[in-house]
Image: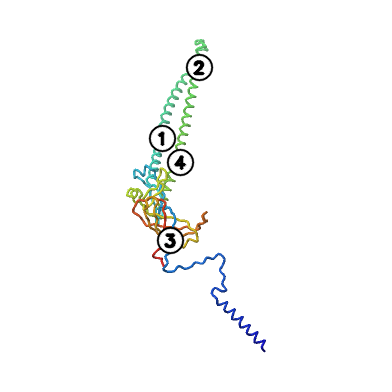
Amino acid sequence: MRPLLYVAAAALALTAAVIALALRPGAGTTAPPGAVALAKRPPDTPAPEAYRSCFLLWASEIPVIAQRDGLARMTLAARERVVHGTALLHYREEEETTRLAILDLRADSLVSRAALAEASLRETEARLQAEAAALSRRLKRAEQNEDLLAARHREGRVDRLTLDQAADQHAELRETVARTDLALSLLHAEHAQRLAELRVEQALLDAEREALETARDQLVLRAEAEGVITDIAPQLAAGGLAGIRRGDHLASIAAPGRFLARIPVHARDLPLFAERRVTATLMADGTVLSGQVTDISALRHSLPDGSTHEVGIRFDPVAKEIEPQPASCVFTENPVSAP
């Protein structure tokens, strides 16, 4: 009986030890490999600030086609088609109208050239026909004279030399008539070729005009369907838009005083940037701009420095004329989203 009591006591002691081990904090749990434990920040502890260098970009840059001289004269005819602040189409209506007017002038010139060619043909044809008629009469008289001299030569009244001279004159007139007929044929062939060239040029003009009108109509329809048309030139003159040059051309326009920035960050640093206010100090003159983190997007491929995401910042509008430039940015906790 005593051995059974010893066995029962040992079993109870083992069970108690197992229960005590199971009740210890963290017992029986295993952290997955690579997991990062994030300790919650106490409510009264401020979030740490983050510092980054950034480059201010225009908040909205709209491409446009304009020559430098056109901008200087403020006769810019470009149009911006904008939907929700995004430029969709830019179309120079005055330039297209001018091109159409030039096509009309070229078409009128073709008509005038065709009329002049027709008049020249008629004049030259009339002159050659008159010469041919005169030569025909002279040829007929030469034939009659040769026949008369041949009869008189048979009668012995005219020598052989006179008869040969008459025959030579007759042959010379026949050659002149042949050359006149050839000149008439060449004249008609040249006129036909000139008219064919004019018709080809007219066909090319018609095709160019049709393509230009089609393109203009499509642009007008797309503009009416997709956006609001506003004139750029008055806004440039009034300072409502800022011109961005690429060489000698005005490459694009933007709303002055509105900027954004994109900053690459590592995934582990995302909590330092989410829903943060941003204070940017410009490198040029120390001007301070304030803004807000608007979005965080994942990069398609990680950068060489290990950055995997991109933080988007939109700054509050400023009245001062500021060009895109580098700045130092401080990310602080947004009071609205603070715990």
- Residue type pointed to by label 4: Leu
Are the residues tagged 4 and 2 within 8 Å (C-beta)?
Answer: no
Question: Mark 2 or mark 4, which is nearer the start of the sequence?
Answer: 2
Q: Nearer the viewer, residue 133 or 195?
A: 195
Are the residues tagged 3 and 4 within 8 Å (C-beta)?
Answer: no
Q: Dot 3, crowdedness within 10 Å: few (<14), some or many (≥20)?
A: few
Marks 1 and 3, Cα distance to the nearest angstrom? 79 Å
Question: Mark 1 or mark 2, which is nearer the start of the sequence?
Answer: 1
Comparing labels 4 and 1, the label whose residue is closer to the camera = 4
Label 2 sits on residue: 168
Label 4 sits on residue: 204
Q: Is residue 91 left or right of residue 157?
A: left
Question: Mark 3 or mark 1, which is nearer the start of the sequence?
Answer: 3
Q: Is residue 137 left or right of residue 27?
A: left
Comparing labels 4 and 2, the label whose residue is closer to the camera = 4
Q: Dot 2, crowdedness within 10 Å: few (<14), some or many (≥20)?
A: some
Q: Which mark is residue 49?
A: 3
Label 1 sits on residue: 113
Q: Nearer the viewer, residue 225 or 151?
A: 225
Comparing labels 2 and 3, the label whose residue is closer to the camera = 3
* Label 2 residue SS: helix
Position in image of residue 241 (x %, y %):
36, 50
Q: Is residue 166 left or right of residue 280?
A: right
